[in-house]
Amino acid sequence: MALWEKYKTGMENFARTPEWEKSVIIFAIINAVRVKNAIFNEEMLKEQNKSGASSRRNKPAKPPLRLVK
C-alpha cells in the first residue's frame, strides 16, 4: 500500500519528466494487480461456497497451490 501512495502522489504531480512517466506506469500496474487479486479472491469465495459446508467441517481445504519458478 505504501508503494501505491508513493506512485499515486508522483502521478498527481504532473511534470514532463521520465520520473513522472515511470510513476504513471507503475501506478497502473499496481492497480491492475489489485483488480486481478480482487477478481481472484471473489472467484475463490464462489468456489468455496459451492463445495458445501459439510465437506469443510470434515477436513480443512487446501488452497490450490502450484510451483512457480
Image: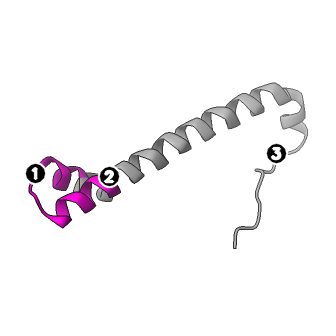
Near mark 1 (Cα within 10 A), the count class, few <14, some 14-19 or many ≥20, is few
What amino acid type is highlighted by mark number 3? Ala
What amino acid type is highlighted by mark number 1? Asn
With respect to residue 46, does 60 lie above or below?
below
Q: Position of residue 55 (x, y in %)?
A: 89, 34
Residue at numbered disc 3:
61
Q: Is residue 21 magenta?
A: yes
**On the picture, is 33 further left or further right than 27?**
right
Pick the residue in front: 33 or 57: 33
**On the picture, is 24 further left or further right than 64?**
left
Q: Position of residue 1 (x, y in %)?
A: 35, 53
Q: Nearer the viewer, mark 3 or mark 2?
A: 2
**On the picture, is 15 further left or further right than 20?**
left
As measured in the structure, the alpha-carbon distance from the residue carrying label 2 to the one carrying label 1 is 13 Å
Q: Is residue 10 magenta?
A: yes
As measured in the structure, the alpha-carbon distance from the residue carrying label 3 to the one carrying label 2 is 35 Å
Residue at numbered disc 2:
27
Q: Residue at x 76, y 33 (%)?
A: 48
Q: Which residues are magenta?
A: 8-27
As measured in the structure, the alpha-carbon distance from the residue carrying label 3 to the one carrying label 1 is 46 Å
Residue at numbered disc 1:
13
Q: Position of residue 54 (x, y in %)?
A: 88, 28
**Displayed quadrant of residue 25:** bottom left
Q: Position of residue 52 (x, y in %)?
A: 84, 26
Mark 3–mark 1 CB contact (< 8 Å) = no
Pick the residue in front: 2 or 34: 34
